[in-house]
Amino acid sequence: MAVSGARRNPLRNLLIRLVWDSGLNPGDYVISFRSRGAPSGVEAVRGDALEKVYLRGFEARVGGRVRYIPFHRVVEVRNEATGEVLYSSRKALEEK
């Protein structure tokens, strides 16, 4: 039996929930991602800046413009209200 892409990508599922689940406050969530242009190499965007979630990435308002961010660049998704880390990249864990 084939497994759909949605089932295999927990990060995508989480971001879709942030966009569509009215029971969540997207502003409570911060998505950190690798960015070559950032001084520290990592930028962050709040969940309420999400515009659209695709199969391999998402669009978010970052610095006054909409940017496409591939999933492989996401380091962490954290709920700032509770401090809970909902997603952490395996690569980011290996680099620590």
Image (cartoon, helix red, strand yellow):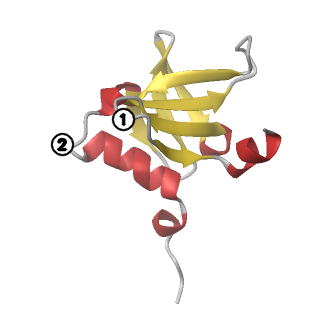
Q: Position of residue 39 (x, y in %)?
A: 74, 11
The residue most toward the right is 95
SS under mark 1: loop
In the drawing, does residue 7 fall left or right of residue 82? right
Q: Position of residue 5 (x, y in %)?
A: 52, 66
Q: Amino acid at mark 1?
A: Thr
Query: Badge 2: few (under 14), some or many (20 or more) residues near its Cα, within 10 Å?
Result: few
Q: Indicate the quadrant where residue 44 lies.
A: top right
Q: Classify 36 as above or below 86.
A: above
Mark 2 sits on what residue? 22
Q: Classify 41 as above or below 33.
A: above
Mark 1 sits on what residue? 82
Marks 2 and 1: which is nearer the front?
1
Residue drawn where x is 51% and y is 10% of the image:
63
**Where, quadrant-wise, is the C terminus in this rendering?**
top right
Front-lying residue, 12 or 41: 41
